[in-house]
Image: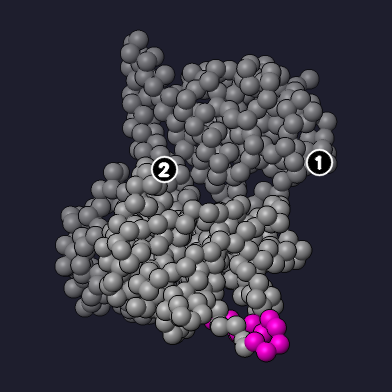
Amino acid sequence: MASPEDELVGDGDRLQAVRETGLTAVADADMDRFARLVSRMLGVPVALVSMLEEARQVFPGMVGLGEPWARTRQTPLSHALCHHVVASGEPFTVADTRADERTAASPAIDALGVIGYAGVPLTDDAGRVLGSLCAVDTRPRRWSDEDLAALRDLAAACSAELRLRIASSQRELARQGEARARERADAMQRRTRTALKHSQLLLRAADALADTTGLNEVRRRVRELVSGDLKPHYVGLVLAERRRMRRLIDRTGLAPVEYTYETYSIDSAWPTARAAREKRTVIVRSPEELADQYGPDAVAAFGRLGLHTAVCVPLPGTVNSLGTLVLGWAHPYEIDVLEQAVLASLAGYTARAVERALFVDDRVHVAHQLQEAMLTDLPTVDGLDTAALYRPAAQADMVGGDWYDLYVLPPAPAPAPGRGEDPATVALTIGDITGHDMHAATLMGQTRSMLRQADLDHPGEDPAHIVQALEHANRELSVGSSGTLVHTHLRPCPPPDAATWELTWTNAGHPPPLLALPDGTTELLHDHGALVHPSLDPSRRTSHRRVLAPGTLLLLYTDGLVERRGTDLDALTDRAARTLTAHRRDDLPALLSHLVDTVAGPTAPDDIALLAVRVKQ
């Protein structure tokens, strides 16, 4: 005797609907796309669009499944955890199939490697469950509310696609003479096309907003998403920050009125403020309604934007609203219940993107503060002109590990009785720690401090010895720094050559320093060794020496100055050398700014640090 669950799976109307989708154990491009979206959004190795036929489970959409299932795209019904979804008509989740009495005996555990499972129903227009959209993990997985919400959104979009296919199938039957079926199919197709249009908007939103990192990028992508389907005249984002509303300004200048009304109280008479504080969608249907219910500032702003109708949707946060998404039209616009639901879902995706952008902005701000704190003012050194410049990457969230340093070391003790102290040594460093994040900035600070300490603890030693001491501390203390640097010592030569300076340097895998000589020629100091890394042997570090005549200009720089994708490194290095030589007598801070503008340009993709020293004449 068949169980009630088997009767549901074998229901004739349900099986007919499955057939009318046209999907079976054959790859379907759209269904594979849904599987890829599930895999990417939930971070699972396996994702399936599963349909239950009378005697088997088929996968028209699939990613990550092993053989032979990847080739055949089907299993017996005995392997189908989707059976639970179809039987209950509800989402079915299991953290560990081996430990759950409902699934512990399923052959899918060993055959398909299903350990964590989450399935959401795929339904037709009558609510019949045709199959499920499944996320599968090969290890235990506790499914979060956000996981299930994303899976439901994707399942709604997939269901809309299935309904459209069923409607198309039924329309084909209508062409064969079934007039009444044609009418039903046409009506269903209209409804389904509308639903599919909005579902695809949500699919695009899930995809487009998943990797945003900045607030301005979030606003731009939301505007691009809604422009094609809803065609609003205006799209805005207003953030709620400590009882204040702050509008994200459109820097393209398309809405200059935003500057006038950039901030206002969350308790003020704006529809955007009401939506945020009451956590509900607010619709303004006409200028008359706006004037009747809201304040003069809102009326003036809407007038200058030329808006007739607007919808203000709160951005849901963990406790309070994060702000408001605003869409406005220059003409009367009817917003039906379905569109309100779509906008609420879009606001949810936008809110998560805003939270992520705020988090990244905060971390980047802290990292920039840390980085700038490390880049201290240069001390004054008799006989030398000095200048430094640090310019962050054009991309705001790129925090680098670039740094420069210049300090005067205490005179070393006299090497023999009766001799005076050695002249003071000026230490210069340029470096670049691997990475572009908060961790890289932190390691930069630690490395900079350790190098200073090594210089102080080893008086009289050359730069190679100092860098070896740094590497010893880095390895033994498990600091984990890796990257490149040039460390140099500058010391005035003894009389009668007191106007000249001796340069001693060691290069750990860094771009070669540049010398602009008094005769108008340039020279690259090519000698270098391996980069700094805990796994590398530093025992072969060597120091190199060079005497700098009066008027000589030494430039230390990081690779952001001369490395650019699609551009020859040597060509940019030559440009830097020519610029340095042509302006070698200029004011040093102005020279460094001109050098960056000329060689790297205003949109350099990497941080740039420069340190210049010129021997006075």
Quickly name the residue at label 1.
100
Tell me which segment is drawn in magenta.
406-419
Q: Is residue 253 above or below residue 123?
A: below
- Is residue 417 covered in magenta? yes
Asked whether residue 412 is drawn in magenta, I would say yes
Residue 64 position in % (x across, y down): 63, 30
- Check disc 2 and give the amino acid type: Arg
Res 204 label: 2
* 203 w.r.t. 190: above or below: below
Q: CA distance from mark 2 to mark 1?
A: 36 Å
Does residue 598 sit above or below 551 in this rendering? above
Q: Earlier in the sequence, mark 2 or mark 1?
A: 1
Q: Please state which of residues 500 and 149 is positioned toward the viewer in this rendering.
A: 500
Q: Quadrant of residue 460?
A: bottom right
Q: Give residue 582's position: percent from left, percent from top.
A: 26, 63
Q: Is residue 239 left or right of residue 56?
A: left
